[in-house]
Image (cartoon, rainbow, N blue to C red):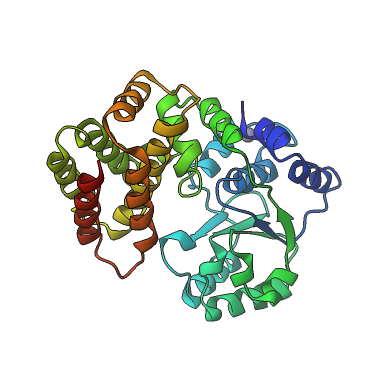
Amino acid sequence: MNSLNLLKTKQSVVYTILNNALESDKLAHAYLFSGIKGSLQQETALLLVQSLFCEQSKWACGQCVICNRIKNNVYPDMIVLDGSLGSIKKADVLDLQHRFALTSLEKYVYKIFIIKDAHHMTNGAANSLLKFLEEPSANVLGILISDQTEALLPTVISRCQVINFKRLSYLDNFEIAKLNNIADLEAYYYSKVVFNHLSVSDFIEHEAFQLFQITFERFIDLFDTKPDMALYSIHNILLKHKDKEVVRVGFDLFINMLIVFYGDTITQSQKVNEWYDLSVERHKKGVNSNQLLEVILETKNKINPSINNALLVDQMVYNLKEVM
Ligand SMILES: [Zn+2]
């Protein structure tokens, strides 16, 4: 299923709003896509941009050269600022305006900017953006994406047409992952813990996900028989990675997935794949899941930017060994 069908079936209200706008050629100058992460905001933003440039059909075909260049973010008239990588500063917004002031590099007149995690704009950036939004030039379209709209300046919000994306269910997310040709186990990870960190189209390739997956699966293979080796794998695979942001996301996925896993040893009703189901069965017999869960939840509550993850993990595994 392509992005358009996903949008139609999983976010039908959003589809109707955007479809009407495209049909009547009355797009707003700026949209704010609001709602928790992993509700198809990013996919919809790209689809909308593709639809403005694709020559094959009203909604983008998703297949042509132009659609692919936009998907791969190598389209000069589309600029993406990504607040998930750090705060967006005034200079970033000024640079965007500057680049838009130059002549269009493509034969189309539209110029698009997308701001992911728009709440990570500094006040300076937000004020510059505001000036930009207040003089809407007919050929610029902005798409702001945020799951924390309360952290945006009210004046910025009032300049945008706000489109609310509804929270998708676990089953929706599982289906979305499967429709993206993702295997059962990875689709399960996506639908349970990954969806609000990384997008469905590229999480498999993401370093944070890969580190999480190796660490989690080794941990589960080893913990009930060789807990010290399980601890070693967290330190040596996940925590020693040099990119702090990768470690932060990977560690968060790891802790959340442990909670899902030990939850499944108590209540599992769904089959995932052979490795996962056998692991659940083994741990069900061999460990005290309720007490393990308590320890992991305690650890999760202690996670914050200033805490040393390595110490936190040592303490967690020590406590897990005590109660297993
Ligand atoms: Zn196309």
> Where residue 152 sits: x, y (%)?
61, 71
Outermost residue, right side: 24
| Pick the front one: 36 or 324 | 324
> Where residue 143 sits: x, y (%)?
64, 58
Q: Left or right? Give the position of 94 relative to 130.
A: left
Q: Left or right? Give the position of 319 relative to 207.
A: left
Corner quadrant of residue 128:
bottom right
> Where residue 245 sits: x, y (%)?
33, 58
Q: Left or right? Give the position of 272 relative to 149.
A: left
Viewport quadrant of the C terminus = top left
> Where residue 121 sits: x, y (%)?
52, 71
85 over 319 or under it: above or below: below
Q: Please state the quadrant of the image where ligand 1 appears.
A: top right
| Pick the front one: 232 or 97 | 232
**Residue at left 28%, top 43%?**
211
Viewport quadrant of the N terminus = top right
| Pick the front one: 168 or 21 | 168
**Residue at left 41%, top 61%?**
85
219 over 180 or under it: above or below: below
For the question of whether residue 303 can be seen, the reply is: no
| Pick the front one: 285 or 186 | 285
Q: Left or right? Give the position of 270 relative to 241.
A: right
